[in-house]
Amino acid sequence: MGDAGQGYARLVEERFGLRLSSRHAKQLEEAVPELVSDSGYHGAAELYVALAGGRHPELVERLAAALTVGETHFFRVRPQMEALRRVVLPELIARRAGDRALSVWSAGCSTGEEPYTVAMLLLELVPFLEQWKLQLLATDLNRSVLEVARHALYGEWSFRDTPDAVRRSFFDAEGERWRLRESVRRMVRFACHNLMSDPPPLMDPRHEGFDLILCRNVTIYFGPEAVLRLYARFAEALAPGGWLVLGPSDPTPVSGSGLELHELQDALLWRRGERPGASRDLSDGVAGSSRQRVSPQSGVSEAAARGDDADLREVWPLAHAGNRVDARRRVEAVLGMHPLRAEAHLLLGMLHLENGAAEEALASLRRATFLSPDLPMAHFGLGRAYQLLGELDRARIAFAEARRLLSAVPAEEPVSGGDGVRAGELSQAVQAQLSSLPPQRSCRVSS
């Protein structure tokens, strides 16, 4: 890298914290002549004098964007996504259920797969999400990748870690590419942002900070001092107890940064400490103001998921008495206080099925199986919903899963959410539904 190149590299580091290595030399040599051509200056030296004097900051921004790689895809780094799905997001949802307010920042979002992944996880986890005050902000230095993110049209490479069921649920095919549905796109707001010079972009000043910040594979480009400053900003921008997700190759925060390391199965995540005097225990993978045991399937604390059993027991008697609206409202009231109550999602789904509302039933029953995969009645209900929607291959898979779960349950044992139905009776119903389906097509369909 020659003297001129080193000058441009210093500019990029001063303005954006990016430390360029020798492997960036070729990229710099290609990017600077293009800037010169677009700027109208007579050579790299003349342009450098102008940029160093503070003129044309947008050109320095373009240069920095050209030197960073925005490679990403949906559900990238599976252990981290599982930690979000099973532990972090359920914990935050339970914590915020009172005010129904949640704030997330994807810093260095590139083409948008990361924040959209978080949006899809929230849609799977949170009932009545439209009633929440959700701030899902995604920022990047590169304006061109933000335009790609806003259009949300992706090729096959973006789905290499994505379950097929997710693509079917949230995307529509457009030729050989896939368009994210509007219901997910509108959840995310994109903005251009310089991590080193711009203040943290919390959209609602009434919030005490972000509940979750993701900044993955961004600080690998930063110098040590820039990393320290950025992590200090993240610690200040997080609400007490808020989480920070860094990339596996990113530098780790140092002691005294205000960020505490937590190991959640195969993922390492960071968390801002609670207020002074509050417990910071993560005894089973979920932090909170008191020790909470975590369900091995969902990562949901028992205190968060328990709900009001008395209210749920009254649901079926209300429905059988003809008060289906009251029964549904009773379940929705429980979910309003306990949004991670799998049995309540199951009951709501079965009520929707009785009313012939297959789409609504499907959404509730998918949440039930998402939160508690071992509920045979929920899988049976999924099968019925898929039947009503004409998706017979998925119905067969759901019924088969219900049959598998029931094989381990004594025949006389009542099944959860079944209005007194016993396991043996449900097994007969499952087999009858499977027998009624037409022969399976040769192609294999994932559930």
Image (spheres, grey):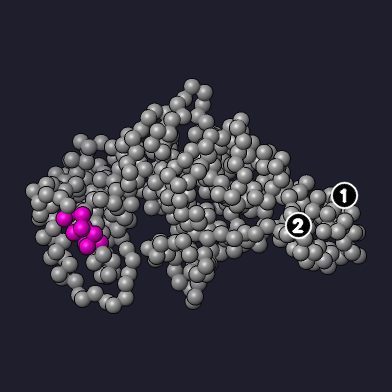
Q: Pointer 2: what residue?
A: 22
Residue at image coords 28%, 37%: 306
Question: Considering the numbered disc 2 on the image, is that residue within a helix, a strand or a loop?
Answer: helix
Q: Of label 2 and label 1, which has the lower sequence position?
A: 2
The boundaries of the magenta stretch are 398-407
Determine whether label 2 and label 1 are within 8 Å by CB: no
What number of labels is visible?
2
The answer to whether residue 342 is magenta is no
Q: In this rendering, does residue 204 appear at all?
A: yes
Percent position of residue 166, x then y: 40, 61
Question: Considering the numbered disc 1 on the image, is that residue within a helix, a strand or a loop?
Answer: loop
Residue 14 vertical placement versus 63 (above, below): above
For badge 1, the amino acid type reads Gly
Q: Pointer 1: what residue?
A: 53
In the image as oriented, which residue stretches furthest toward the top? 277
Residue 116 vertical placement versus 252 (above, below): below
Q: In this rendering, does residue 31 appear at all?
A: no
